[in-house]
Amino acid sequence: MEIQSVLLIGAGLMGRGIAESLLRSGLRIFWYDVRQEDLKKALMGIEKSFQKQIAKGRLSEEEARTCLANATLLDSLESKAEVQLVIEAVSEKLSIKESLFQTLNQICDEKTIFVSNTSSLSINTLGRMSKRPEQFMGMHFFNPVPVMPLVELIRGLKTSEETVETIKGLVAKLGKTPISAPDFPGFTVNRILVPMLNEAYFCVMEGALPEDVDQGMKLGCNFPMGPLELSDFIGLDTILSVLEIMHQGFGDSKYRPCPLLKNMVEAGMYGRKSGQGFYDYRS
Ligand SMILES: NC(=O)c1ccc[n+]([C@@H]2O[C@H](COP(=O)([O-])OP(=O)(O)OC[C@H]3O[C@@H](n4cnc5c(N)ncnc54)[C@H](O)[C@@H]3O)[C@@H](O)[C@H]2O)c1
């Protein structure tokens, strides 16, 4: 089956990027976020991004108009959704995703495939909650989605071959490269990346300056972005959720979240999206 229409849930950092990539690849999207202001802001962000691409000669005015005409913003999830695929990109909380899947089950055809962009939650658990484990899998994009070529594909024990093939087809249509990752907390990339980010927070807590930590990893390890800049970009709240899920899932103290990270999230310092994180973005 070739995916042509998608119901996308979530218009935060990831939802916005996923929407832009889907639209650029000619897909029709129905898009919902519980915070309607976020949804409108995200669409405006895509319009701005298209304007920049037009200015650089990478997109024509007409192509941009056609892409944008393919997006329908939804103000509720009550009506029947005639789509082949649902992409879930809401906050990294199991309870939020569970109640969303209950609603989605009521409005979607039983053949509709559901995928989750979760960074760390169990695909087997989410698949069971979706009540369609054969048509459920993880489709983990990377931020910023229009730029990053990787998609991790995570199948649950019950995911059907047909579902995997359909989603691989979508990844190809988006011009991205898939890797298969096992269904364990953090999958592959975050399993390696997030403990390293956590270690950087311990360095700061123990007295290192964020600028020095970032400079060290850029000049000493050839990282394109320092771990603290990257953390502010990803969202400290999301990273804390991922660490907590890895800590709980593996039962291994090496994944314990740094107390400084917890304090910052408690204080609402989520990074770029809230204006303050390891760096200040308010001016
Ligand atoms: N931030 C990253 O770099 C990154 C990378 C890959 C995957 N992810 C995963 O993608 C998902 C979203 O992360 P994000 O960074 O976009 O978070 P975010 O906080 O930027 O956005 C989450 C969005 O979900 C919306 N939302 C919450 N509950 C909802 C509901 N019941 N119905 C509809 N919308 C709802 C919020 O209003 C918000 O706009 C998470 O599962 C996260 O782990 C994040």
Image (spheres, helix red, strand yellow):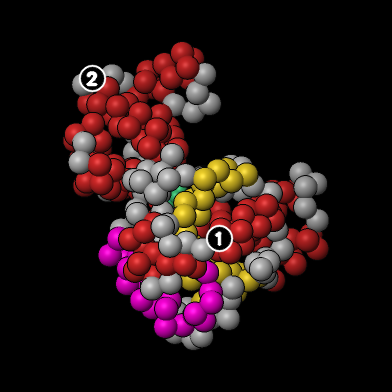
The answer to which image quadrant residue 83 occupies is: bottom right
Locate the N terminus and report the quarter of the image it occupies: bottom right
Of the numbered discs 1 and 2, the one sitting upstream in the chain is 1
192 vs 27, nearest the viewer: 192
Residue 64: % across, % down? 74, 61
Amino acid type, label 2: Gly
At x 55% / y 47%, what residue is drawn? 151
Alpha-carbon span between mark 1 and mark 2: 50 Å
- Mark 1 CB lies closer than 8 A to ligand 1: no
Residue that carries the numbered disc 1 in the rendered image: 161
Which of these two is toward me, 31 or 251? 251
Q: Residue at x 32, y 32 (%)?
A: 195
Q: Is residue 14 left or right of residue 240?
A: right
Image quarter in which the C terminus is found: top left
The secondary element bearing badge 2 is classed as loop
Mark 1 vs mark 2: give the one in front. Answer: 1
Where 153 falls versus 220 (above or below)?
Answer: below
Residue 192 in the image: x percent, y percent? 39, 33
Main SS type for the magenta part?
helix
Quick check: 275 left or right of 8? left
Q: Verify whether residue 110 appears in magenta.
A: yes
**Mark number, residue 207:** 2
x 32%, y 26%: residue: 200
Which amino acid type is marked by label 1? Glu
Can you say whether 9 is above or below 152 in the image? Answer: below
Residue 144, which numbered label?
Answer: none
- Camera-side residue of 280 and 80: 80
Residue range corresponding to the magenta coloring: 94-114
Q: Quadrant of residue 97?
A: bottom left
Counting other residues with Cα less than 10 Å from the Cα at mark 2, is it few (<14), some (14-19), or many (20 or more)? few
